[in-house]
Amino acid sequence: MHRLHMSMVATLILFTTLLGGTSTVLADDASEQLDQAMSQLDSWLAKYDQGPGWHRYLRNEELRLEIAKGDTADHQKVGEILTLYNSGVDGLEDQHFVDVQAALARWHGDVLLPPAADLPALAKSASEQFTEMTPEDVAQAKQNLQAASRRLGSWLDRHGENGQAWKSYLNFSDLETELATDEPDLVKLESVVRQFASDKDGLEMPKYLDVWKTLRKYIDTHQVAKYPQVKEQYQQQAVVLAKLLAELPEKSTFRERELIGQRLGYFERMGQSASLVRAIRGHHSHPNFSGYVVEDVLAAAINRRVDEKKEGLTDNIMGTSLVIDAETDAKVKADVVPNEQRAAFNIMLEGEIKTDAVGYNRGVTIWSVGSSAVEASKAFFIDENGISAEPATAVADTRTTVTGLSAKRRIIERIAWRKVGEQKGTAERIGARKTARRVSAQMDAEAGTMLGDSQQKFDDGFRHPLVRRRAFPEVLEFSSTDKALKLTMLQATSKQLGAPAPIEPLAVENDLGIRLHESLINNFASTLYSGRTLTSHEVKTESQNSPLMKRFKEKQEAKRKARGEAAPDEEVVEEDWAITFAKRYPVTVEFNDGLVRLTIRGTRFEGEGPVQERDMSIWAVYKFELTEAEGLKLALQEWDVVPTTVETGGRIKAADEPLRQKLKARFEKIFVDVELDPLELPGQFAKAGLFGYKQVSAVEGWFTLGLDQIPGTGNADDRVAKSTPAGEETDESQKQ
């Protein structure tokens, strides 16, 4: 009937991942959610004989007493109980336990945080509170790993050669060999861990993740239990952490924060000081991205007029076979719906379907015209798992007029006319129900195809790569108001920290708005580039395959022609090169005073001449400027290539000069002014037109950007006209 063009949903996933907003959970909400989750767990465990045992292990009675104390609850005791919920014991993966764990973590973090001033002292005292791992702990960790590896091994065995290839890639035989002994070779097991943590499509599946998680836990538990030096290392690191926290300036740098994050990740791996780790993160690791897209942008991509004709449709109502020509005139529009738990919007259709029908019933031919007023709606939701939808709903009000009737005998015609009059109301109600079902079924069918495509793009382009790298955002919260779709994100791995302070609320002043902290980019860059070797061939291939880069190059070419400049010499062949990024701080940005400082750090450089292995930093400072054409200019202020030691007080030495000059010659072609045209959104959102840069700021680590749609650049009216070949049957042609 009508085509909703739901392909915009795929773009929406990526778009709202880049542009979003914030939400706040109050203490009362956190305790209420925890109480609800506990009640559901109690009801569920009451059905099983193992219920009392679970309650004892998880210390649920103690937890209830602490919850009743509110904000005076014992922070340390609640932290110990939370550690039990996070212990990975077989069975705790059930959703009832997971719900309590999530609610307890939020309550513990939001309500029971000790004062920030107490953190150095808490870290110092933690050095004397080492949690020993017993043989029973090792045995439990091994049992969990054996169960996970058996599940994966059996599953792979059922997949023939492909399954065996996966086992070979994962060094699965080494895992099985080491599990068969009481004194495993931890070096071999670490090599298995690296394979499970590699960036290979498929390893984001739960079966693989379960083995990686339980293997990591087994190795770490075994180390703590068997090697006394782990305790010494922990105590040393706790003292260092206390010193770092005590000396942490109000405006900390990425280096100072990375040193803290590394130690928190180590404590988590070794199963130590869980309460302290959560307290430090609660004070020093906040969401580092927020933003929004207003309803009008969504509407520009979706709103349209539907003008559609279908001929030769067939149906049957009350025994009368019908051949129908239908014409639809309707409007489709989007409506953002307030929702604090996830982003929500409706796609609605409202209009009229006019019909011209010929019916056949026992030798009687009936001609009629009709009109159905139709209203339909389908609800969509966006959350950390992607996009979903509820079944469409529709209502119709049908009115028909019989314009002619014929039969072989006049008496039959008179009887037919009488029956038509008697059954007209019933037939209209049946027709209205069928029309509503057809409209909602088609909305569901069209949305189903597009939702599948959208989910695949979300998973393949965002979720799965980050899950494989153990870098999926710690917080990814979508929400919506009656005016905008919003997103909050905290991008930080277990060894990283987010923003040092809560995000300042981002007022909905523009059509698109974002606010991000430099830690977002630095954390992502560390995950993607730490220790990685990048070649000129990879960069060229990525550039050629990227739609974004293709559009950028096309625009640059158009500007070149407008300036009357000659085309570049395509015969010039650039030398191949490669850079191996530093393992720490491979790429960083720093926002301040309207400027951004970009630094690339490498340890190995290949190109013309011998390979150079030397730690070097390539940095550039750009100033953000709004242009008269509503674009955004990054004006180069200064740049240089220096030994990385210079960043921390070192000096340039004579031995550094050859590589330094070589890199300067290479990067002088890269570090130039960059001028961005008004933004054109991808996919279906291109209908919204161009968006001009209206505000930009870079202050104390935060970057804020606001864009508005440029009047006259969008397609306000997209009329959809289609026809369907004669003879096409409706979905319910044989139902009444």
Image (spheres, helix red, strand yellow):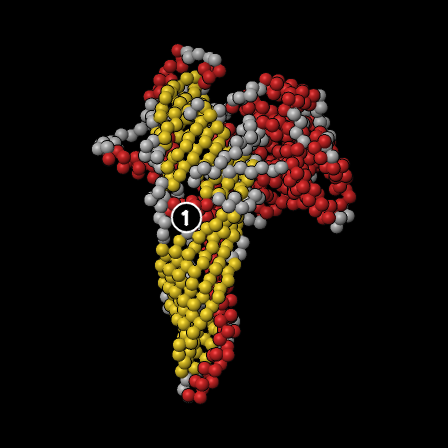
Q: Nearer the viewer, residue 196 or 44?
A: 44
Horizontal side, residue 508 vs residue 208: left or right: left
Residue 460 visible from this viewpoint: no
Disc 1 marks a residue whose amino acid type is Ala
Helix, strand, or loop for circle 1?
Answer: helix
Residue at (61, 18) in percent of width and height:
246
Residue 251 in view: yes
| Residue bearing the label numbered 1 | 301
**Alpha-carbon neighbours of circle 1 within 10 Å: few (<14), some, or many (≥20)?**
many
Quadrant in the picture for residue 615: top left
Residue 160 x/y as whole percent = 54, 48
Q: Return the x and y of residue 530 as percentages of the image width and height.
A: 49, 28
Number of numbered discs overlaid on the protein picture: 1
What residue sits 24% from the left and 35% below the top?
Answer: 562
Name above or below for residue 734 compared with residue 534.
below
Location of residue 440 with respect to 41 vertically, above or below: below
Relative to 86, does residue 698 appear above or below in the rendering? above
Instruction: Tell me where residue 617 appears, x and y as whole percent.
Output: 43, 20
Residue 487 shown left or right of residue 666 in the figure? right
Q: Quadrant of residue 92?
A: top right
**Image quarter hosting the N terminus:** bottom left
Q: Is residue 214 left or right of residue 641?
A: right
What x and y, as percent, mark residue 636?
36, 24
Whether residue 157 is situated above or below residue 613 in the rendered picture = below
What residue do we see at 65% from left, 25% from top? 115
Q: Is residue 682 left or right of residue 317?
A: left
Give the residue at x 38% y 45%. Answer: 688
Closer to the camera in the image, 410 or 219: 410
